[in-house]
Image: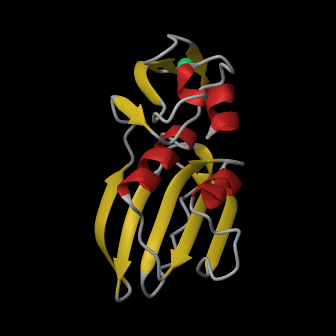
Amino acid sequence: MSELKVEIIPDGTIIDHIPVGKWLKVVEILGLTRPNGGTLLIASNVPSKKLGRKDIVKVEGRYLSEEEVNKIALVAPSATVNIVKDYKIVEKFKVAIPDEIVGILKCPNPNCVSNHEYTKPRFRVESREPLKLRCHYCERTIEWDEILGNL
Ligand SMILES: [Zn+2]
């Protein structure tokens, strides 16, 4: 089956190659569940050469911050971000999980100092496949499911 062509938007961001079912998490990360969050176009369960099936999120009139891109990488490591201006893709890149994740993910250990003091949570990537992170403060390791629940 051939890959469906991603329909272009006038201006904004197309997040492609999201694992099936993860589009909602992506939309939550971007704060797009609020009114005025930007016009959203979602395509779920789209045939894909790379993934078999994929989700696509298109956001009109909105571009992503580095922090948002890093968060998306945690939820959808396979995702590609396309920046659209005037109906043309002007930039395209694959999301990447940074070596250190600061401030975007809470530590699941209730006794961790990062949950009690004014300090930003900080994690180091221990493994990428499967994704495993280690808390800089309490050394607790967190895996995929917990990462999704603590974003
Ligand atoms: Zn911790």
Report the quarter where the N terminus lies: bottom right
Quadrant holding ligand 1? top right
Instruction: Name which residue lies at 32% across and 55% down.
Output: 93
Report the quarter where the C terminus lies: top right
Instruction: Name which residue lies at 54% across and 43% down.
Output: 76
Instruction: Name which residue lies at 58% across and 61% down.
Output: 56
Q: Nearer the viewer, residue 87 or 103?
A: 103
Against 50, is 91 above or below? below
Query: Can residue 30 be seen from the camera position used here?
Result: yes
Q: Nearer the viewer, residue 132 or 6?
A: 132
In the image, residue 71 lies at what x, y percent?
50, 46
For the image, the number of numbered tags is 0
Query: Can residue 78 be seen from the camera position used here?
Result: no
Against 143, is 79 above or below? below
Left/right of residue 49 with respect to residue 91 in the rendered view: right
Determine the residue located farthest toward the front in the rendered image: 117
Instruction: Name which residue lies at 59% across and 26% down.
Output: 107
Against 43, is 69 above or below? above
In the image, residue 52 lies at what x, y percent?
61, 44
In the image, residue 23 lies at what x, y percent?
66, 55
Against 93, is 88 above or below? below
Left/right of residue 139 with respect to residue 148 in the rendered view: left
In the image, residue 30 lies at what x, y percent?
56, 62
Left/right of residue 7 with respect to residue 88 in the rendered view: right
